[in-house]
Image: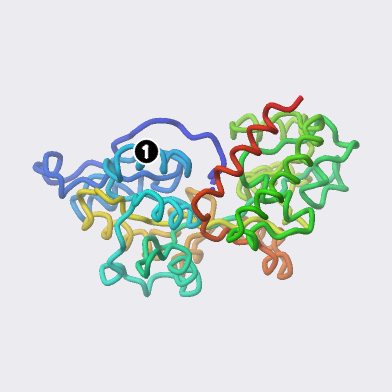
Amino acid sequence: MPNRRSSLKRLVWLAAICLSPMAASANEKVLRLLTWADYAPKEVVEQFTRETGIKVEITLSNNEEMISKLRATGGAGFDLAQPSQDRVAGPQAEFGLYKPLDLSKIQTDRFIPAMLEATKKNTTVQGKVYAVPHIWGTDGLVVNTKLAPQVKDYADLCQEAYSGKVSMRLKRPTLIAFAFASGRDPFALYSDPKAYSVLMDEVGKTLMACKKHVKFYWDNKDQLLTSMRSGELVAAMMWDTGGWALNRTQPDIRYLAPKSGALGWIDTYAIPAKGRNDEAAYAWINFNMRPEIAAKVARSAGNFTAAKGGDTDVDPVLKRQFNESFPEAALQNIKWYPAVPAGLEDIEGRVLDRIKAAR
């Protein structure tokens, strides 16, 4: 999800210098991490290496690319990955990308209990758990409340009054969001592909009609934030930390939980099926769940973590912004992504292709 809905740099960077002279050549001293931008800040990687002697090789990615990379290799090439919780059970059942976790090697008492149990449930396949939670956040609306005071829900992006001044992504979260805005619950249809396909077709027609009002479908974080700052855009479907970053310098721009509910995501830790260094993976998970380390990651990512006490040292401005965006009713109305059954993303992909091709 950060920053998480931005376009990511396609690169691998080697972070931290191991103090052991033999570490660079020993597989057990290297952790190959497939993750999102800002989830493994340099200071955290360096501290991990100092304490454990394990170097960390970081490849930045996103959900689609993680699945693609691991499918291409049968789960090889990485020791630890960070897919969103809704992208674990389906790909695991279909492609066998991950190993079941050995929970005895994870210090589960460091996690927020409810979030840990929910993630375990959503990533269980044939009785085995494949992921634990790390970072969570939401997608909703970022609105210039002075220039677009009527934008309260996703469908309001299609109002004539704001034509040519709004943006969204041409990705599955937009389909899900507009389904909820129409009064339907797409998650309730996950077990019925035929009914889900009908709903997605309906949402697709809505978004095709809305297309004339969209300034651009964003894929580039910097383009989106710059356009909001300049007033070129007055509203957009966006991730929470993007809105909070804009709000720091332009108070009229706010991140809003839509009337029909923000979309909640949890990024996890999962061990690829052919990873070479499980012990390093478990060490990294336990290290990151320490409250003081979790706080450093939260500051880097801009989102909260699943670590107990990990928000103790979080920026007070961020805490205030969170509380303003999520009064209790809005917090209770978050629509948390469940596991995506195999085949549903093919349905969504066809609808997205039709929207893209529409004139």
Task: Quadrant for the C terminus, please.
Answer: top right
Q: Position of residue 119 (x, y in %)?
A: 46, 65
Secondary element type, mark 1:
helix
Q: Is residue 64 visible?
A: yes
Q: Residue at x 55, y 56 (%)?
A: 265
Vertical relation: 169 (above or below) 177: above
In this rendering, the count of numbered labels is 1
Front-most of residues 273 and 249: 273
Front-most of residues 8 and 78: 78
Q: Residue at x 39, y 54 (%)?
A: 92
Farthest residue toward the right? 161
Front-most of residues 107 and 163: 163
Vertical relation: 218 (above or below) 42: above
Q: Determine whether, in the image, residue 210 is placed left or right of residue 174.
A: right
Q: Determine whether, in the image, residue 122 is placed left or right of residue 51.
A: right
Q: Determine whether, in the image, residue 296 is placed left or right of residue 273.
A: right
Q: Residue at x 87, y 47 (%)?
A: 149
- Colour scheme of the picture: rainbow
Farthest residue toward the top? 359
Q: Position of residue 290 (x, y in %)?
A: 36, 65
Amino acid type for the residue under numbered disc 1: Lys
Location of mark 1 (residue)? 69
Farthest residue toward the left? 22
Disc 1: CA contacts within 10 A as few (<14), some (14-19) or many (>=20):
some
Res 215 → quadrant: top right
Vertical relation: 231 (above or below) 179: above
Q: Is residue 248 visible?
A: no
Q: Position of residue 1 (x, y in %)?
A: 54, 48
Res 123 → quadrant: bottom left
Q: Determine whether, in the image, residue 266 is placed left or right of residue 130.
A: right
Q: Position of residue 287 (x, y in %)?
A: 31, 60
